[in-house]
Every structure is written in C-alpha cells, then in structure tokens.
Image (spheres, grey):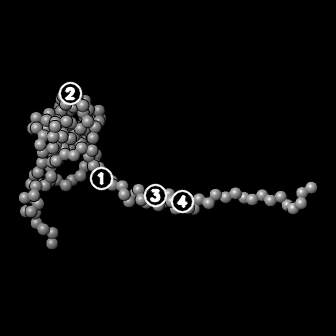
Amino acid sequence: MRLGSARQDDFEINVISLIDVLLTLLMFFVMTTTFIQHSAMKVTLPEASESASEAQRDALIVMVDADGRYFVDNNEVLNPALDTLKEAIARIAGDNRDRQVVLRADAATRHQAVVTAMDALGQLGFTHLSIATTRSKDAASDAPSPR
C-alpha cells in the first residue's frame, strides 16, 4: 500500500547560460578575425610612383620570392621549370583565361624568375596581368594632402 501520491518531477535543462557563453565566444571570434587575405609568404614589393588601388577579389595571384620560388594562390610550385609552373597555374585557374592575374614578385627577385612567370602566363593565354608594387616614399610625399 502506498501512502501519498506518486510524484514525478519534470526534469529540465537550463540552457540560457550555455547560450550566453556561446554568444560571447561567437562575438569574440567575429571581433578578432581579420577578413583580409594575407599571403603566407613575406614578399617585399618593389616601389613605383603610382599604385593602382583597385582590389581584385577574384584575381589569380602568382608570387615569386627572393630565392626564385613560385607560389600560385599560396600553393608552392616545387619545380621551378616553365612546364611545371604552367601546369600549376592551369590547374588552379581552370578554364577562365580572362581572369585578372596579379604578379607579386619580391624586389630582390632575379629578373629571369619574373620573366619566366610572365612567359608561363602568356603561353596559357592570360591577357590581364598586373604587377604588384608599393608606393614609393617620394611619390607619397608629393601627393596632395587632403583638405
């Protein structure tokens, strides 16, 4: 014989504090994340008097470091031969030959390495080629100051 009524407690999980912690972590990661693409390789660009500030989001980036190593969209080309470079560019670029190409070569790079990259791009049929530079200090001081 049972005395008293059968009690059945409802079990609840309080998730409000969990949601607070997750939202705080989400805000932290959003605030500390940079959305600018940084190249994995440090390249000191040559200087020029004028620099185009037009940013191309879909541009194919071909980098040449000071040692003459090639990188296509941050993927290193292990063999510096022309055919290997062409194969790597074609594999990453796909069939779009009208795509903008930005050549980022270190200022201390041998001229032959830059010409080889330009030759590979030309043989593949790319026609929109830009060479990345930084603005020289003389040109920056000659620029009119904002009023």
Q: Which residue is mark 1?
A: 36
Q: Residues within 10 Å of mark 2 (few under 14, many from 20)?
A: few
x and y percentages locating residue 120 in the rendered image: 18, 33
Q: Count every numbered label the image shows and give the total.
A: 4
Identify the residue at image location x=11%, y=60%: 140
Secondary-structure class at tag 1: loop
Q: Which residue is mark 2?
A: 83
- Of badges 1 and 4, the one in the foreground is 4
Query: What separation in Å lies between label 3 and label 4 (alpha carbons)?
Result: 10 Å
98 is higher (above) or lower (below) than 54: above
x and y percentages locating residue 54 in the rendered image: 21, 53
- Can residue 86 be seen? no
Q: Which residue is mark 4?
A: 19
x and y percentages locating residue 130 in the rendered image: 17, 45
Query: What separation in Å lies between label 1 and label 4 (alpha carbons)?
Result: 29 Å
Pick whichever of labels 3 and 1 is earlier in the sequence: 3
Task: Give the numbered dot on residue 25.
Answer: 3
Question: Disc 3 marks which amino acid?
Answer: Leu
Residue 122 placement, left or right of 89 = left
- Can residue 39 be seen? yes
Question: Disc 2 marks which amino acid?
Answer: Asp
